[in-house]
Image (cartoon, rainbow, N blue to C red):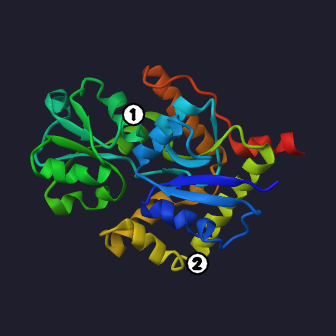
Amino acid sequence: MNHKLTVAFSPCPNDTFMFHAWVNGLIDTQGHQFQIKLADVEALNQSAFKEEADITKLSFSAFAHVADRYELLTSGVALGHNCGPLLVSKHNFKWEELPQLKIVIPGKYTTANLLLTMFAPDAKNKRELLFSDIEKEVMNKRADAGLIIHESRFTYHQRGLKKIADLGELWERNYKCPLPLGCIAVKKSLPPEVKIQLNKLMKDSITYAMKFPKASADFIRHHAQDMNEKVQQQHIALYVNQWSLNLGVMGKMAIRKLLEAGVVAELLPKAEVVFVDELKNLVN
């Protein structure tokens, strides 16, 4: 049976790169029809709490709150080394000064905020802001520091901002594994065979993107707004890697470790993680 499904992802280059072939019908979509929605990652997190999309990009921190309603694809994940969120400021603040600082964050349920809260639990003076506005807020001195994600990690120094800490480095130093940032989740209520098809669709779309990297250039540029092409390519190279194609054992272990660390820190509910590739036995 073919389905009409809602697919939600962010306008960031890594997502538009991965989803381009899928949403533009350049690969076999198994006869399914798709309604596409693009939104900032925290808006996607909030949308998932309402179960608005059948397939959605999601912060791992947010996934813990909807793991009873969503399962994870093994393709499309943002996970890797040296890709963590950065805490930046106009001044050379020290780590021990964080509790006194006014910090802008890209969303309560982002993995970035989860990491900041884990590593700096006393830094409580936080305010949510759209991720793309955080640098400007700090530059205009409306905040002492900003927690930046996505392409901002490539541009903050050009704007006179200084790095206080790399939360990805802290994660890898403490937990000895790559950092999971975002995932692609599908509704549990979908038939198992459909979820398996969607998992293959995601992998096929990424494979196409990697084989024909210039094919998605216009699609990426259209949604990336004023981001220059060099930053777009840096962004894609950082967040789309071997784990994006297939999580594998290491990727799954890293995800479970992050969610468990959130539980230990009393920041996340205990969540049972189901990966779609584990459903094959239900179909065969």
Q: Is residue 233 visible?
A: no
The furthest residue to the right = 284
- Left or right: where 95 falls relative to 106: left
- Left or right: where 176 falls relative to 158: right
Q: Who's the residue at 18% across and 53% down the image?
A: 136
The residue tagged 1 is 114
The one of 111 and 11 positioned closer to us in this rendering: 11
Q: Who's the residue at 54% across and 79% down the image?
A: 215
**Residue type at the position of mark 1:** Leu
Q: Earlier in the sequence, mark 1 or mark 2?
A: 1
Quadrant for the C terminus in the image: top right
Disc 1/disc 2 C-alpha distance (Å): 35 Å
Q: Which x, y percent locates residue 66? A: 56, 32
Count residues near mark 1 (Cα–Cα under 10 Å), then give few for <14, some for 14-19, many for 20+: many
The residue tagged 2 is 212
Q: Which x, y percent locates residue 230? A: 35, 73
For the residue labelled by badge 1, is the local secondary structure a helix, a strand or a loop?
helix
The one of 222 and 242 positioned closer to us in this rendering: 222
The answer to whether 53 is drawn above or below residue 224 in the figure is: above
- Left or right: where 112 falls relative to 142: right
Q: Which x, y percent locates residue 102? A: 16, 34
